[in-house]
Amino acid sequence: MVTMIAILDNLRSVHNVGSIFRTADAAGVEKIYLCGITPEPTDRFGRPLGQFVKVSLGAEKSVKWEKVKSTNKLTDRLKKEGYKIWVVEQSKKSVLYNKLKVNKLKVALVFGNEIKGVSSAILKQADKILEIPMAGKKESLNVSVAFGIVVFGLLYK
């Protein structure tokens, strides 16, 4: 069985993060790390954020999550714990996600900022860089859509 966690690196949109929580719940992702500016399901007083809850439909209660300042320190720690760091990003070094086997691995999937993507420092730490094949004229997908494609594609081959 695959152990899969997600790292959201400086995502901006509450809607995207809420959607990712909902998809993570449906797929069985064990935990989500919210790094940098990535919005949390609650405000600083612990109250649920209305826009978040509207999209996540309560998945923030069923999926473990943790707020972390530094993605770099987190990925260093996870590597020491035996996780493979797989970044979802377009790159000259990327491989198609649907060509990978994940049996019996501990995988941390990293998804980056909606505009800037994943930082070069995190790309350097990656064990693999994964890409979704694109057939149309647009060269990218919404991060929450990409999350769903890759997570379900890896977990349910």
Image (cartoon, grey):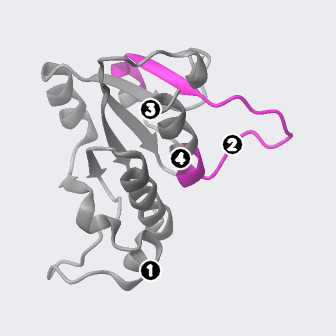
Q: CA distance from mark 2 to mark 4?
A: 14 Å
Q: Which residue is depicted at the point 46% across and 15% down?
A: 101
The type of residue carrying mark 4 is Gly
Q: Is residue 157 above or below residue 57?
A: above
| Image x and y of residue 94, in percent | 57, 19
* Neighbourhood count class around disc 1 (C-alpha, 10 Å): few under 14, some 14–19, many 20 upward: few
Q: Is residue 145 above or below residue 50?
A: above
The kind of secondary structure element at disc 3 is: helix
* Neighbourhood count class around disc 2 (C-alpha, 10 Å): few under 14, some 14–19, many 20 upward: some
The type of residue carrying mark 2 is Ser
The type of residue carrying mark 3 is Leu
Q: Which residue is mark 3?
A: 155
Going from N to C along the chain, the mark reached first, 1 or 4, is 1
Q: Which residue is mark 4?
A: 148
Q: CA distance from mark 3 to mark 4?
A: 11 Å
Q: CA distance from mark 3 to mark 1?
A: 26 Å
Going from N to C along the chain, the mark reached first, 2 or 3, is 2
Q: Which residue is mark 1?
A: 54
Front disc: 3 or 4: 3
Q: Which residue is depicted at the point 42% across and 66% down?
A: 18
Q: Which residue is mark 2?
A: 140
Q: Which of the numbered marks, if any, corresponds to residue 36?
A: none
Going from N to C along the chain, the mark reached first, 2 or 4, is 2
Q: Which residues are magenta?
A: 123-146
The kind of secondary structure element at disc 2 is: loop
Going from N to C along the chain, the mark reached first, 3 or 1, is 1
Q: CA distance from mark 2 to mark 1?
A: 25 Å
